[in-house]
Image (cartoon, rainbow, N blue to C red):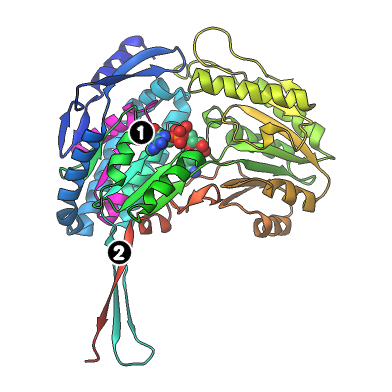
């Protein structure tokens, strides 16, 4: 990728706030810098939204809500479909932009564009399936008419690790349901959301429906809006820690909430599993996005009889992954998002080694510029080691052994999180037994890839509340209203 192409793309990204159908500077005129994590260089400066801007966005969202709720579902569907087409046509722009601001390799970034765009298409198809219900009351005296209505203006807060898909996964169902919204992207990766807003404008979204407020003070943006009684919902994707704070803030106005929080996914490999397939799945579930995914395999639980073989095969496969700036197609593993992230990951590796783990490959901080960390495989990690208790968010695969199925289930469930789990076994009955016993919202059975716009994405326990995607996704943005009809 040529430096001119990068400069040209960056120069084309809008950097202001988008409120009430108009691009504008932040109140006070401040901006903040966005870095390329592969170089540490500043690549753009974006308007730094304040609580005052957030309130202007609230005004715009509230003003647009009633007319937007009354638009025909087909109109909303066609805007989403058109956005899908525009985004797909601009795949290369969005892919490169994500590689530049977030670091993921271009091939993965293209995959995220396809996945992110799919939410626009999926919810364009869901928008017109706005089913209500009509029933006779059990007494046979009157009738019950139920319709679904949009919940109202929403605050959508997204993380940095999937700068496009986490945005479309919220914006698309909100549009489909007839909600207006204020979008607050992560300060580390606002550019993708900025460019995506342009796509929605081109697709014909009316003024005030989508308002974009990026900024460095997330709490002052969310705090101002969440105290306003016109806001009806907050949908958040991010860490469990921040999610809990927002749940508490949401209680003030009794807001509807959707919380897509952290994960600590077990990746269980039984003695009858196809180990080559398991390694293939492990590379996807672990190394994609440099391990910075809420669904990332975090704890490799492998039957004692195949642990050594699996660890060695995985280690060999990981050694084949070239690390470097994601713009070079040769590179399969990009940088971590920041120096802090890299320091935390390295501390977890050092702690595991201190606890008795063995480094099979990796375990070192990358030399030179950027926040690179060598893809790492650790074996013999003791179950109590800190690295197995926390979300690693890095390209580290810690492997530990189990003796039998019951122990595997106990180890897998021994976490506060309950987002994703992966199970590799040739025995389908065992796969089904495991899905009954595992306390996770999503299970990959002999596959390391889970995400699909048509499936309900979400977790249990401290991984969150609600689902995104699937038939469930739109109902997060609707409420029911029932009308009692008299006996004719
Ligand atoms: P984060 O919680 O630090 O930030 C997420 C978003 O919340 C950002 O936009 C941030 O600016 C904002 N935020 C931070 N503090 C806030 C506050 N006090 N009030 C309001 N908003 C605030 O998370 P992150 O580091 O951006 O993302 C990584 C986390 O996201 C990981 O825990 C990961 O597992 C989780 N995640 C979950 C899913 C899922 O679907 N379950 C998907 C992707 C990421």
Residue farthest along the front direction in this orientation: 252
Report the span colored magenta: 174-202
Q: Are marks 2 and 1 in contact (CB under 8 Å)?
A: no
- Element class at badge 2: loop
Residue 169 coordinates in the image, percent (x, y): 38, 45
Left or right of 397 on screen, residue 168: left
Q: In the rendered structure, does residue 176 fall within the stretch colored magenta?
A: yes
Q: Which residue is mark 1?
A: 218
As drawn, 454 above or below 449: below
- Element class at badge 1: helix
Left or right of 101 on screen, residue 407: right
Asked whether residue 375 appears in the rendered view, the answer is no
Residue 324 coordinates in the image, percent (x, y): 52, 15
Q: What residue is rendered at 47% in x and 19% in y? A: 326
Q: What residue is rendered at 46% in x and 39% in y? A: 242
Q: Quadrant of ligand 1?
A: top left
Left or right of 484 on screen, residue 380: right
The numbered dot on residue 316 is none
Q: In the rendered structure, does residue 179 fall within the stretch colored magenta?
A: yes
Q: What residue is rendered at 26% in x and 34% in y? A: 51
Cβ at disc 2 under 8 Å from ligand 1? no
Q: Earlier in the sequence, mark 2 or mark 1?
A: 2
Asked whether residue 242 appears in the rendered view, the answer is yes
Residue 201 coordinates in the image, percent (x, y): 19, 38
As drawn, 41 above or below 338: above
Cβ at disc 1 under 8 Å from ligand 1? yes
Q: Which residue is mark 2?
A: 130
**Label 2: few (<14), some (14–19) or many (≥20) C-alpha neighbours in 10 Å:** some
Picture quarter with the N terminus: top left
């Amino acid at each position: 990728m040529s430096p001119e192409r990068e400069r040209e793309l960056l120069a084309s990204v809008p950097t202001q706030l988008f409120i009430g159908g108009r691009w504008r500077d932040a109140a006070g005129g401040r901006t903040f810098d966005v870095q390329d994590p592969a170089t540490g260089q500043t690549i753009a400066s974006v308007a730094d939204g304040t609580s005052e801007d957030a309130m202007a966005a609230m005004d715009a969202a509230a003003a647009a809500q009633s007319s937007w709720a009354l638009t025909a579902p087909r109109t909303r569907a066609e805007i989403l479909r058109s956005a899908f087409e525009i985004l797909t046509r601009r795949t290369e722009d969005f892919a490169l932009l994500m590689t530049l601001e977030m670091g993921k390799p271009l091939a993965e970034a293209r995959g995220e564009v396809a996945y992110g765009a799919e939410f626009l298409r999926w919810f364009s198809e869901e928008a017109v399936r706005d089913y209500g219900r009509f029933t006779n009351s059990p007494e046979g005296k009157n009738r019950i008419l139920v319709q679904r209505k949009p919940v109202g203006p929403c605050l959508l807060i997204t993380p940095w690790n999937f700068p496009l898909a986490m945005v479309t996964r919220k914006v698309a169902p909100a549009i489909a349901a007839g909600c207006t919204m204020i979008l607050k992207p992560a300060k580390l990766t606002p550019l993708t959301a900025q460019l995506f807003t342009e796509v929605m404008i081109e697709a014909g979204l009316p003024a005030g429906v989508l308002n974009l407020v990026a900024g460095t003070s997330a709490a002052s943006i969310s705090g101002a809006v969440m105290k306003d009684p016109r806001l009806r919902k907050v949908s958040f994707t991010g860490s469990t820690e921040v999610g809990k704070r927002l749940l508490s803030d949401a209680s003030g106005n009794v807001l509807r909430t959707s919380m897509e929080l952290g994960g600590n996914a077990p990746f269980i490999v039984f003695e009858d599993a196809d180990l080559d397939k398991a390694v293939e799945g492990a590379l996807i579930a672990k190394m994609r996005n440099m391990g910075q995914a809420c669904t990332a395999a975090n704890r490799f639980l492998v039957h004692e009889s195949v642990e050594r073989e699996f660890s060695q095969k995985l280690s060999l496969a990981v050694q084949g992954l070239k690390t470097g700036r994601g713009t070079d197609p040769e590179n399969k593993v990009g940088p971590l998002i920041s120096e802090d992230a890299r320091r935390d990951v390295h501390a977890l590796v050092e702690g595991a080694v201190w606890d008795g783990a063995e480094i099979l490959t990796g375990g070192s901080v990358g030399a030179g510029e950027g926040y690179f960390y060598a893809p790492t495989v650790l074996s013999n990690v003791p179950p109590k080691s800190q690295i197995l208790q926390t979300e690693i968010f890095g390209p580290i695969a810690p492997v530990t052994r189990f003796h039998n199925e019951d122990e595997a289930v106990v180890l897998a469930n021994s976490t506060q999180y309950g987002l994703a789990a992966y199970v590799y076994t040739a025995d389908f009955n065992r796969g089904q037994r495991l899905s009954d016993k595992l306390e996770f919202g999503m299970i990959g059975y002999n596959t390391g890839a889970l995400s699909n716009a048509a499936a309900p994405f979400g977790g249990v326990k401290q991984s969150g509340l609600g689902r995104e995607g699937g038939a469930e996704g739109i109902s997060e943005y609707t409420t029911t209203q029932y009308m009692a009809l008299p006996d004719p």
